[in-house]
Image: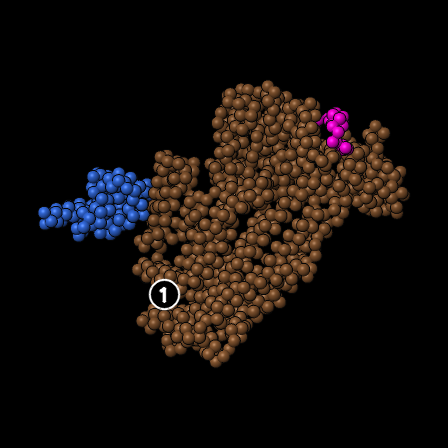
Amino acid sequence: MTGSKSMMTDLEEEVLFQLSKQRTAMSAVALADDIAVAMRKIIPLAAIYQTLHQSNEDGFVEVVTSNSRKSYRITAAGITALQREWNYQREQLKHHA
Amino acid sequence: MRKSKHNPPRPAQKLLTLFLRRDLAEEVTGDLEERFDKMMLKTSLLRARFDYWRQVLNYIRPFAIRKGRLQKIMHYGMVRSYFKIGWRNIVKYKAFSAINVFGLALAMSVCMLIILMVADQRRYDAFHAKGDRIYRITLSTNYATTPLPLAAAIKNNYTVAEETTVLVPGPAGDAVYQNKLAEMRGYFAEPSFFSIFSFALEKGDVSTALQQPYTAVISQELAFQLYGNDDPIGKTFDFSDRQLAFPQEFDGIGAPPVPWGTFTVTGVVDESKYKSHLAFDVLMSAATQPSLITAKKIEDRTNAWDWFYRPYTFVLLKEDKSLAELQTALDDLSTRTYTDKKNEQTKDLRFIPQKLSDIQLNLRGNDTNNRLPLIGYKFLIILACVIMITACFNYTNLSVARALTRAKEIGVRKVTGAQRGSIVAQFLSESVITSVIALVLAVGFLFLLAPAFKDLWLNKFLKFELPSTPDVYVVFLGFAILIGLIAGIYPAFYLSKYNPVKALKNPGTSQRGKFGLRKTLSVVQFVISLFFITTAILVYRQFSYYMQFDYGFKSENIVNIELQGVDYEKLKHELSSIPEVTNISATDIIPATGTNNGMDIKKPGTQDEYIQTTVLQTDENFLDNLEVKILAGKNLPPREQGANFIVISEKALQKLGFATPHDAVGQTVEARWSNEQLVIAGVFEDFTYRLLINTREVNPITLRNQPTAFQYANVKISSKDPMGAVKKIEAQWKKIDPIHPLKYEFFDQQLASMQQGVFDLVKILGFIAFLAIAISCLGLLGMATYTTERRTKEIGIRKVLGAADFTIARLLSKEFMMMLLLAIFIGVPLSYFINNMWLQKLTTRVEFGITTALAGVFILLALGVITIASQTIRASKANPVNSLKSE
C-alpha cells in the first residue's frame, strides 16, 4: 500500500480488519495483541486508542460497555468503509498494472 | 483485582494522571495495568516496567492530552517550530551555547547523583507484596524500637491489624558445624514474619520454618559456609552467643561465648535477592526464647513495657483500615499502658507508625542499618541546589546580555502577529533544548562522578549502589526539562515584553538599566564560590589538625587484638614469649574510637551531685602501655589485690572537688546504681577519650580492673618490623584459638580512620567548590566575551586614537574586577560568619583566621583574573583595522 494514496492509514485498516474478523467486541489490549501478530510489530496502545477513537467518531466502530470495561465492535458503516478501502486499493493496483 | 504481586512503576502512573484526559483515565489505566500483568507473565519485571513507561510516554499525543490553557499555546505545529528555531539559535551562538551547556551539565551531574542516591534508597523494601500496608511502630522519642509486648497487645486488643510481628536482635556469635565456624548475626523471629514480609525461602517452608524452638532460617551465604553444597535443611549447628555488635556496629561490644544449644536449619533465604533495611544471617525461632530465659542465657523482657531498646515491631494493616485508625489504636494503647505520670522514662510516650517505604530515608535512633540520615540528604540537596542556581544564573545572565542582539528578532515577530505567550514559549523551548543537551553531557559526567562517590570511605557504611534504571533516566529527563524552564523563565519573560516599535527603532535602549541584575547575579555567584573555597580550605585544615592531634596518649606501634572470647591471661602468657612484644595490656573499649561506657561517682556521704565519668575496664599495664603519666599515687593494682580500686583522670579529680592529685589518693568515692565504695589508687594526666568530632571538652575518666569485661589486648611491638611481629602474634594466636582468625588493627591507623569521614567531607566540599568556581568562571568568560565583542568598534577607535593595549585591557576589565572585589568584600565576612557557626561547636578546632580568607581570595582572584584577561588582552591586542571593519 505504501506509495499509493490510500483513504485509510495502515493502522486504521488493520484495526477495522481485526474487528471485522471477530463476532464479539474486543478490548483495546486484546486488539493490540492481535495487531502485533498481524503486523509483526508492537503498536503502542496509545496509537490503537487514537485510531479507535477516530473510527468511533467516524461511525466505523461502536463502544460496548460491560462490567465497566469498554470494548469495541465494528459497525456496518465500518465494514462498508473497509470494503471501500479495499476496492480503492484494487483499483490502484489495476491502474499501476 | 490485580493478578500480579508487582505494581507498575508509580512515577509513570503519576505522569499519566497528570496529562491524560479525564474521560480516558479509567479505561487507559485499566488497560495498561492489564498489559503490565501480561508482560509480567511473559517476561521479567524490568521489561514489564520498561514497556509500561513506553506505553505511558506514547500517550503524550494531542488526542490524549487534557485540554487546557497550555494546549492553546502549545499547538503541535507551533511546538515543532519553536524547537526548530531554538535549535538554530543554539547552533548560531556556539560559544554561548557551549558555556551554558557545560555549566548546566556540571551542576546537573551533581543533582543527578543525588537523584540516584534517593532512587537507590527508594528501592529498599520495594519487593514486599503487602508493602503498602506494612508499618513499623516507632517511639515518639525517635526510637525505631518498641517494648517487646507491643506486637501481641496490638493484635489481641485492637481490630486494625491483620498481623503483627516482632523482631528482637539477639543471636550474634559463632555457629559451628563439624569444625566449620561462621559468625552469624540475626533476630529472634515469629512465624508471622513470613506472613508480613515477602522474603521467600530458597529451601524450606515459610509456614513451618519458625514454628518450633531451636529452629532457624539462615542466609544462603551462611549455609554455604557451614554446609558447602550439601542441602542444609534438617542439618544442625551449635550456636554460642558472643553478643557481637548487631544490628548496628555500635550495638554491643562483645562478650565471652555462651553456648545456646543445637539448632536445626528449617529454611534458607537468598539475601542477595532482597534490598531491605532488615539484613540478617539468621532468623531464630522466637519459640526458643523461653528456654533460653529459663537457662538465664537471655533476659526476660516478655512483659517489660519500660524496656524498648531492642525489639522492632511491625504491623500489617487490614485492607479496610487506615493509618489514622492505627494511630488511634496506638494512642489508646499508650494511654492505657503508661499510666504512671511520674515515670520520667515513659511519661508522654507515644507509639508512632512509620510506613515501610519511608523507613530507609527516615533514619531513627536504634535503627537496623547504617544510612544517611535525612539531614544528610538535606545538606547535599542544599549544596546541589546552590550549584544548580549558579549554573542557572549563567544562563539568565548570558541570555539577558544578548537581549541587544535579539531585540530586533522579537520586534519582527511581534509586528507579524506573534503573541507574548508564543514568544515566551519560543525562548523557553531554547532553554529546554539547552538543558536537554546538557543532560547528555551530565550523564557522561555522572559516569565519572558515581564511581568516585561509591569509593568514598563513608560508602562502606552507607552502601549506595547507585544503579541507573530506565525509571531514573525518565526522572533525569523531567529534571532537565524543569531546569530548562527555571533557567529560561526570566529571560523569556524579560525578552518577550519588548515593545515592538521601540525594539525595531532602537534595540539598545530596551536593555538599559538591566546590567544591574547581571552584575548582581555574577557577584552572587562569586560570593558562593568564595564561600565554598574557604569552607573547603577550612575543613581540610580541620582534618589535618585532627590527623596531627595529640590525644594525650601514645598509639604508635600498638596492635589492638580483638579477644573474641579468648582468655586474656592465656594470650598474654603466649605473646610474652615473642621478643618483639614489649608490653601488653587489656581493655574493654579502645579509646577515641567512638564507643564509651559511663559511671557516675561522688564523694560518699555528701549531698554533692554525681559526676558523670567515662569508665574503662583495663588491667594494670594499660596506662604504662599508652604512656599516660601518673600524677599521684600509683597505677591500677592487679585484680588479685582487690576489685574496688580505681584510678581517675585530672578532670575527674577537679569535678570531684579535690584540690590536688595527692589529696585524692586513698580517698573513697561512691558509684551510682551499684552503690559500691571505690578507693582512688592514683590520678593520671587527662587524655582525649571521645571521638574528636564529638568532643565538647575533655571528659572525666575512671579506670577499673574487671578482667571479665576485657575485649581487646593492646600489644606494643618494637617498631623495626611490625608486620613480622604480627605474623608471630598470629602464630601464637592459632595455638590458643584455632577456630577464630586473628582480628587486629594498628592503633594509630584506627585513630586515623576515625577521621576518614571528615576527609570525605573535604573531598565533597572541595569538589563542590571546584564546580562553583568553574561555573562562575564560565559565566565570567561568557560575559567578558560578550562585552569585548560588543565593544569591538570602540576598541578599534581607541587604538587608532593612540590608546595603549594595557589601557584598553584595563578599561575592559574594570567592571569585572569591581564585581570580583565586591564579591570578596561580601564573601569573606559571610564565610567567616557561617563557618564559625559550626566551628564553635567543636572544642578541638582550627580558627578561621586570615590565612584561610587570604587563600580563598587568592584562588578566586587568580582564576577570575585569568578568565577576564584571556578575553580582554586578546581584544586589546587586535588589529584596529579589523576592529573597525567588524560592524
Relative to B10, A15 lies left or right: left
Query: Residue B313 appears at what percent x and percent y?
Result: 58, 36
Observer-nearest residue: B679 or B206?
B679
Query: What residue would you read off at disc 1?
Result: B422
Magenta-colored stretch includes residue B580: yes
Disc 1: host chain: B
Observer-nearest residue: A81 or B520?
B520
Query: Residue A57 appears at what percent x and percent y?
Result: 24, 52
Residue in view at x 52 percent, y 62 percent: B777
Asked if one can make out residue B873 in the rendered structure from this viewpoint, the answer is yes
Which region is colored magenta? B566-588
Tell me the quadrant of the picture where the N terminus of chain B can be found.
Answer: top left
Most distant residue in the bottom direction: B801
Amino acid type of the residue tagged 1 in the rendering: Ser
Chain A on-screen colour: blue
Query: Residue B212 appears at what percent x and percent y?
Result: 57, 22
Residue in view at x 38 percent, y 40 percent: B48
Query: Residue B515 appears at what percent x and percent y?
Result: 50, 71
Residue in view at x 57 percent, y 60 percent: B529
Q: How many marks?
A: 1
Chain B on-screen colour: brown
Quarter of the figure with residue B176: top right
